[in-house]
Amino acid sequence: MKLNGYDIPAPITMSIDPFEIAKVNRTASGKYVKDVIAIKNKYSLSYKGLKPESMAVFRSAYEAGEAVDFIYNDDKGEHIVSVYITALTKDIPKYHSDLAQNVNITLEEE
């Protein structure tokens, strides 16, 4: 797996959740009308812990607020998608504040 050209560790779990971008209206008669513009994916990565150098890769992409390339493999082969990091949550251990535990990262397809 890679993010923005950097190797990232494989997560304990990764889920891919498709979501719809659509324009929804009601006609004068009350009929529901939906125009699907696109179907995009939301990727959720979960880690028990990350070292500072791995966390820095995610943090820099998150703070930049720009789309980055995310490369991953599944049963269909390698995928390269452009994503934004929309959420980056973690716990900080009391005695090792340089480490991140229970890290959850959400990537949204551009």
Image (tube, rainbow, N blue to C red):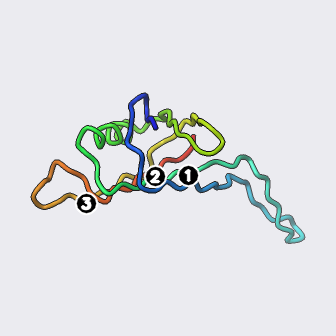
In the figure, 23 relative to 61: above or below? below
Closest to the observer, 100 or 73: 73
Check disc 2 and give the amino acid type.
Thr
Check disc 3 and give the amino acid type.
Asp
The CA span between labels 2 and 1 is: 7 Å
Closest to the observer, 79 or 89: 79
Contact (Cβ within 8 Å) of mark 2 with mark 1:
yes
Furthest toward the bottom, the residue is 30
Closest to the observer, 44 or 49: 49
* Mark 2 residue crowding within 10 angstroms, few (<14) / some (14–19) / many (20+): some
* Mark 1 residue crowding within 10 angstroms, few (<14) / some (14–19) / many (20+): some
In the figure, 27 relative to 77: above or below? below
- Dot 1 falls on a residue whose secondary structure is strand
- Mark 3 lies on residue: 91
- Dot 3 falls on a residue whose secondary structure is strand
First in sequence: mark 2 or mark 3?
3
- Mark 2 lies on residue: 106
Q: Which quarter of the figure has residue 2?
A: top left
> 40 left or right of 42?
right
The quarter in which the C terminus is drawn is top right
> 38 left or right of 10?
right
Q: Position of residue 41 (x, y in %)?
A: 60, 49
Furthest toward the right, the residue is 29
> 85 left or right of 37?
left
- Mark 1 lies on residue: 42
First in sequence: mark 2 or mark 1?
1
The CA span between labels 2 and 3 is: 16 Å
